[in-house]
């Protein structure tokens, strides 16, 4: 029954290195249809169905015409495929305030995303580098406050930030929202960079110091080139996080600059008019498309990012 | 910059000056926003702030009003149900999936991708999809009925008694993939020899998991627990998207109470008091964990 696993472990490592060795090496042949396999893959398959179902339902619903949606059930594939709901979701769906669809929210989100990602990563990478390589007394205390702060519900800090931004005259502007995303991205990103730079061999840093390189020189010429992978992880984390944000978008922007998530919620949950489920599902898919693309392209790096960024609620 | 201390070190204040400049944003954020903002909100939760924050103290008045508000009580009940069930189910499902994935299966990457992709989505997207799937007129209920079971009822989003379970289904769909990932990482950290020894002793697999592997994975479990729990307290967008707190106020949650009172009902004091309660809840979760994790033992 279960004894295959143990026997395979040592063999598996050989498999990777030398796939074609003659002689009795490599995996022990096992039956494909053993009872264990049927149970194992059966359970995994069932779970996979539950996870894939919503994606499938979104797809098929968004490609049906309204009459077909009313008649059929949500799981049946569309009889005739139409992309009209997509066009409508993108360009002409109404939120009760305006009728230019999700496109407005999409471009707002892009305008929010780009500076937010760049600024938050720039600030956090320098902070992480300073914490890792240029320690001074007290810095770690502030860092601890920051990390503990990551767990504090945002709701506790939102109103003081509203007041701060209002005093600065940037409440309701995209600049204000970029600052907010930078602030709340700080704990996790700084932690990420600090751990990465701490793990780099210290000799590198020392050698550069002996050669007379200063704080910024070492950062730009040694650390930046070496930290590319962690920059990618940080980017994945921030792009998905900021794109998916709803709370900050709704609190810190005005209706004409709402990000895509807020726009989407307003379109789908607007009480006016007939509910067009196909348009709603197309809109939902469009909003989910950006993080999904990031997810599928980044693969394993995404897992690394969320394992590190799981702190962000 | 002149005075050299003993051991020939330069003056403390100007040591690592660049580093201090570079860390200014972090220090400011830590002090002003995280510490200052939190204290500010807590202080103002004891005032009579309505439309605008005012420093006229009324003691625990806001909290008394909060705890006598039906909507708040419902929010807390919902959070308790949602929280406890989310913890149980996501840990169990996440662990079982991870254990299945750890059997050296084929297509591991495919399965991982499938289980984890919901986590990449926004809670808004998740809420809206499940709102559609659970729609009684077109979704699961109508399908089962069309199969011949005409009295079948499953309309969680329209039934005040079970609406929170409808939200739970969506929340689990989004969150269990992450738990699976963390658990899998934990399982991969278990030494192969443990398995071999257990097998030599003839201990059945399920028993090995239950009595040996799970206790060994305690740190992973605790970390995951803290992460899920602090996420649960913040649950907000999911409810906004899926039910808008309805039917009536049946699916209200604390985070939504905070937002509505702060930015819509113009009743800041209530918002501050409610958010302070959220803070206390998180503190109850985090402080023991931080103590176990960082206190007590020396850091190497």
Image (cartoon, coloured by chain):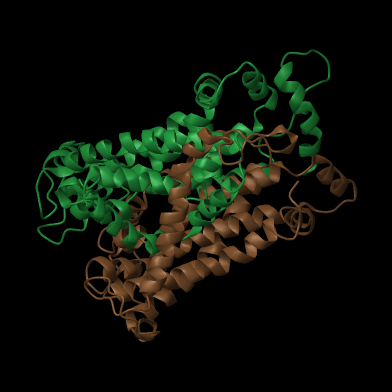
Q: Does residue A63 show up?
A: no
Q: Judging from the image, what is the letter of the chain drawn in green?
A: A
Q: At x 40% / y 33%, what residue is drawn? A: A294
Q: In x, y percent, where is residue B136?
A: 28, 64
Q: Nearer the viewer, residue A200 or B102?
A: A200
Q: Quadrant of residue B285?
A: bottom right
Q: Residue furthest toward the right?
A: B201
Task: Tell me: residue B61, above or below residue A76.
Answer: below
- Quadrant the N terminus of chain B occupies: top right
Q: How many marks?
A: 0
Q: Judging from the image, what is the letter of the chain drawn in brown?
A: B
Position of B198 with respect to A173 (left or right) is: right
Q: In x, y percent, where is residue B2?
A: 60, 33
Q: Residue furthest toward the front?
A: B2
Position of A215 with respect to A208 (left or right) is: left
Task: Tell me: residue B237, above or below residue A10.
Answer: below
Q: Quadrant of residue A163?
A: bottom left
Task: Tell me: residue A152, above or below residue B158.
Answer: above
Q: In x, y percent, where is residue A110?
A: 27, 36
Q: At x 49% / y 56%, what residue is drawn? A: A149
Q: At x 31% / y 60%, what residue is drawn? A: B242
Q: Nearer the viewer, residue A131 or B71?
A: A131
Position of B1 with respect to A292 (left or right) is: right
Q: At x 80% / y 12%, what residue is drawn? A: A22
Q: Does residue B232 show up?
A: yes
Q: In x, y percent, where is residue B44?
A: 36, 73
Q: Nearer the viewer, residue B21 or A294?
A: B21
């Amino acid at each position: 029954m279960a004894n295959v696993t143990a026997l395979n472990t040592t063999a598996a490592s050989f498999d990777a290195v030398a796939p074609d060795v003659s002689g009795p090496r490599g995996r022990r042949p096992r039956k494909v249809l053993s009872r264990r396999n049927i149970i194992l893959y059966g359970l995994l398959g069932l779970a996979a169905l539950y996870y894939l179902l919503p994606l499938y339902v979104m797809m098929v619903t968004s490609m049906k015409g309204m009459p077909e949606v009313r008649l059929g059930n949500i799981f049946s594939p569309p009889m005739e495929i139409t992309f009209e709901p997509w066009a409508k979701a993108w360009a002409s769906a109404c939120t009760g305030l305006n009728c230019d669809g999700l496109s407005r929210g999409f471009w707002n989100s892009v305008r929010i995303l780009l500076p937010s990602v760049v600024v938050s990563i720039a600030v956090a990478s320098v902070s992480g580098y300073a914490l890792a390589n240029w320690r001074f007394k007290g810095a770690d205390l502030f860092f601890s406050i920051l990390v503990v702060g990551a767990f504090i519900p945002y709701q506790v800090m939102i109103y003081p930030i509203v007041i701060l931004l209002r005093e600065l005259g940037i409440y309701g502007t995209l600049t204000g929202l970029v600052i907010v995303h930078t602030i709340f991205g700080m704990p996790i990103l700084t932690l990420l960079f600090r751990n990465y730079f701490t793990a780099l061999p210290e000799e590198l840093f020392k050698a550069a110091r002996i050669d007379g390189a200063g704080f910024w020189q070492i950062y730009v010429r040694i650390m930046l080139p070496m930290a590319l992978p962690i920059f990618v992880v940080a980017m994945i984390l921030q792009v998905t996080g900021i794109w998916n944000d709803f709370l900050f978008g709704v609190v810190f922007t005005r209706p004409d600059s709402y990000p895509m998530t807020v726009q989407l919620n307003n379109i789908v949950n607007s009480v006016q008019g007939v509910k067009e489920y196909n348009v709603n599902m197309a809109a939902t898919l469009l909003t989910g498309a950006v993080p999904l693309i990031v997810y599928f392209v980044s693969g394993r790096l995404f897992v690394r990012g969320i394992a590190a960024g799981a702190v962000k609620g | 910059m002149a005075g050299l201390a003993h051991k020939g070190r330069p003056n403390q204040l100007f040591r690592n000056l660049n580093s201090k400049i570079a860390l200014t944003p972090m220090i400011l954020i830590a002090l002003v926003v995280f510490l200052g903002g939190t204290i500010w909100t807590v202080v103002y939760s004891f005032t009579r702030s309505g439309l605008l924050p005012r420093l006229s103290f009324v003691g625990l008045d806001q909290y008394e009003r909060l705890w006598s508000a039906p909507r708040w009580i419902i929010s807390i009940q919902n959070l308790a149900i949602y929280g406890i069930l989310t913890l149980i189910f996501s840990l169990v499902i996440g662990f079982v999936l991870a254990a299945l994935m750890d059997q050296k299966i084929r297509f591991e990457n495919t399965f991982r991708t499938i289980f984890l992709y919901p986590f990449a989505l926004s809670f808004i997207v998740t809420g809206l999809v499940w709102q559609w799937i659970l729609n009684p007129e077109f979704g699961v209920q109508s399908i089962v009925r069309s199969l011949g079971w005409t009295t079948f009822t499953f309309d969680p989003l329209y039934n005040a008694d079970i609406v929170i379970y409808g939200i739970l289904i969506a929340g689990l769909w989004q969150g269990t993939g992450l738990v699976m990932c963390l658990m899998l990482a934990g399982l991969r950290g278990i030494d192969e020899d443990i398995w071999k020894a257990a097998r030599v002793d003839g201990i059945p697999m399920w028993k090995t998991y239950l009595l040996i592997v799970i206790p060994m994975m305690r740190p992973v479990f605790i970390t995951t627990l803290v992460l899920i729990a602090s996420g649960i307290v913040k649950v907000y967008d999911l409810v906004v998207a899926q039910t808008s707190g309805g039917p009536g106020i049946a699916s209200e949650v604390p985070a939504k109470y905070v937002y509505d009172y702060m930015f819509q009902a113009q009743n800041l004091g209530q918002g501050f008091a409610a958010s302070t309660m959220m803070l206390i809840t998180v503190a109850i979760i985090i402080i023991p964990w931080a103590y176990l994790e960082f206190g007590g033992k020396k850091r190497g």
